[in-house]
Amino acid sequence: MILKKEQMKTSTSAIGFRSLWLSIAILFALTISANSSSLIQQSNQALKHISPCGSFVSPTDKNIQYIGRINFSNPERPYFVYPGVQIAATFQGTSLRMMAKPGSGYFMVQVDNAEPFKIGFRGEQDSIVSLATALPYGSHRVHITYCIEGYELRPEFRGFWLDKGCTLLPSPPLPDRRIEFIGNSITCGYGVESIDPSEHFSYESENHYYTYAARTARALGAQYQVVARSGIGIYRNYDGPKTGSPDNMPNEYPYTNYHDKSQLWDFSRFTPDVVCINLGTNDTSTGTADQKKLEKAYGEFLKTLRSKYPQAKIVFLTGAMLNGKELNIVKAALDKVADDAHKNGDEQVYRFDMTPQNGDLMIGADWHPSVWQQQKMGNELTDYLRGLMKWF
């Protein structure tokens, strides 16, 4: 087919016109796409910093009750590492949300008298978790317990969100009875949520809330403080040199947080009626222990405790993971330290041995006490302390 000159002009014009519109359409689409991408990026940025509806409560609110070793150098972001740190408050409204640093780990929460439950701040953007919704409008009580070891995570509490217009209310006073627990992985709750001794450590299976220490305090109606770390010893940490480990309990004890020398602990902030020390399992681990160094370390640590707490009763414990030769070594060392204290006029030093585990109550991760073994230990210690302290 042969096109005439006029037809060729018309065809060429039409092609040019269509090309022009196609170019405009493509340019418009690219502009819309770029703008959309920009809006999406802006939206994503906004989501990282979005504020929930409601009333924010700062960690500095005078109605928040704190228990345990907490560093308040930044009062808007108090941080802590030991399990058993507690935050309590009484709030108005129908709901409650908690803010914490993303990656802070796990907490146990009890609202009013309901069954306690676990929450987690594990994701990179996990900063707000709901603790209660659809409650009857009114006054409610929340009690939060940090239930893992946090020295690697460095958890921070960053406040609460309440219903719009609601506030925290004055809380009832904390119990007058006070206990301090000093210990190792058994006190931390290592592996307590596992029933497989071949399973290794995980934050998911650790839960201090179910330990003998926490159970004892709840049963006795006492507030309590914990200084404990897995693997730590009175002079030698797990699998450490026979001569001793530099980051043992006596060397870490003066500081607010484990492996953090930035702040000395103010011992006036918590004065216990009784101190329970459950150490020695790691000192005698892997078949290496120096009996004399063990005795000396216990004796020196007793002097430290007595200088901080002149009136407290001090109870040296043996835990459920000690058996056989290792149990005998620790018992002998503790008996000697207690006897020497009595001879020197300190009659407020005591000894108590909890039943060694034998597997009939299951075994937790890495051969640690199961939740049922911890319950048995708690029952034993509760009965002992109730009589010792006359807390009936």
Image (tube, helix red, strand yellow):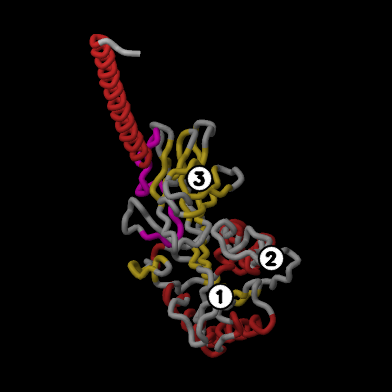
Please state which of the two labelled residues, at mark 2 or mark 3, is closer to the viewer. 2
- In the depicted view, which residue is nearer to us: 139 or 264? 264
What residue sits 76% from the left and 66% below the top?
360
Q: Earlier in the sequence, mark 2 or mark 1?
A: 1
What residue sits 54% from the left and 77% below the top?
238
Residues drawn in magenta:
49-71
Counting every numbered tag in the picture gives: 3
Residue 141: x and y in percent read 51, 43
Residue 352: x and y in percent read 63, 74
Q: Quadrant of residue 322?
A: bottom right
Which residue is under mark 3?
A: 142
Vertical comparison of 273 with 120: above or below: below
Q: Is residue 284 left or right of residue 176?
A: right
Element under disc 2:
loop
Element under disc 3:
strand
Which residue is under mark 2?
A: 363
Which residue is under mark 1?
A: 279
- Quarter of the figure with the N terminus: top left
Q: Quadrant of residue 349?
A: bottom right
Q: Residue furthest bottom?
A: 292
Marks 2 and 1: CB-CB under 8 Å? no
Q: Is residue 167 left or right of residue 289?
A: left
